[in-house]
Structure formats: C-alpha cells, structure tokens
Image (spheres, rainbow, N blue to C red):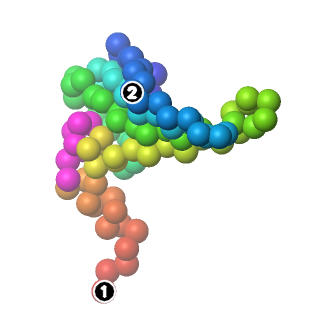
Amino acid sequence: MRAAFDDRSIRRGVVVAEGDHLACQTWIEGTFVREFTQSPVGPLPPNGERVVFDLINIFRFDRQGRLVEEWVRMDNRHLLRQLGAGEGRADDHRGSAVPSS
C-alpha cells in the first residue's frame, strides 16, 4: 500500500473494548498514484483518485497486553470501484473460480 498511495492517512472511529478484545472503525486514505499490486483482483494501474479503505478491526490481547490476533473486515467491492476496477473485472475474477456448466 505504501508503494501505490501518496498522502496516506489513518483515522480511527468508534473504539469498543470488552475483556481481551478491542474493535474499532478504521479509515486508511491515500491518492492512488502507482500500480497497486495487492488488490483482490491482482495488480491495478493508478487512476489518480483519492481512495478510502473502510475497515473494521478486531484485536485480541493476551494477559500481558500483547496483541495476539487481529481480524479485519473490508468491503472489497467498494474498494475495487474506487480503484477503477469496476464491476466487470471483479465479476470476471470471481467467475474464474467457478466451473462453467
């Protein structure tokens, strides 16, 4: 992500803690200026647009307060639209894993 996006920022929203778990909203933003090789559909060329990764993070800590697990929820369809992949490319990628009849 660092290689593909300039002017990156990270913001946290609502944070909820219970027991050894913590959950929070996270927004990572950046201007898409170089090829992004880690998209869900493979490498994508830059489109010069501001892109927002909208995440929900859930962390689990051990008794010493060390992070031992993290889960992340992300809306890949919305992300792909922002990256300029469009519905067609996302559908093509998904369809390639399903055998045709």
x, y (%) of residue 10? 41, 20
Taking depth in this image into account, of 53 and 32 the one nearest to the observer is 53
9, above or below 26, in the image: above
* Residue that appears at 39% across and 27% down: 13
* Amino acid type for the residue under numbered disc 1: Ser
Assess disc 1: are there few (<14), some (14-19) or many (≥20) residues with their C-alpha within 10 Å of its C-alpha: few
* Residue that appears at 34% across and 23% down: 29
The residue where tag 1 is placed is 101
x, y (%) of residue 17? 56, 35
Q: CA distance from mark 2 to mark 1?
A: 46 Å
Res 6 quadrant in image: top left
x, y (%) of residue 46? 28, 29
* Amino acid type for the residue under numbered disc 2: Gly
Q: Nearer the viewer, mark 2 or mark 1?
A: 2
Residue sticking out furthest to the top: 7
Q: Earlier in the sequence, mark 2 or mark 1?
A: 2
Residue sticking out furthest to the right: 64
Taken as a whole, is the magenta stretch helix, strand or loop? helix
The quadrant the N terminus occupies is top left
Q: Is residue 12 left or right of residue 85?
A: right
* Residue that appears at 49% across and 43% down: 72
Magenta highlight range: 81-87
Q: Is 86 part of what is drawn in magenta?
A: yes
The residue where tag 2 is placed is 13
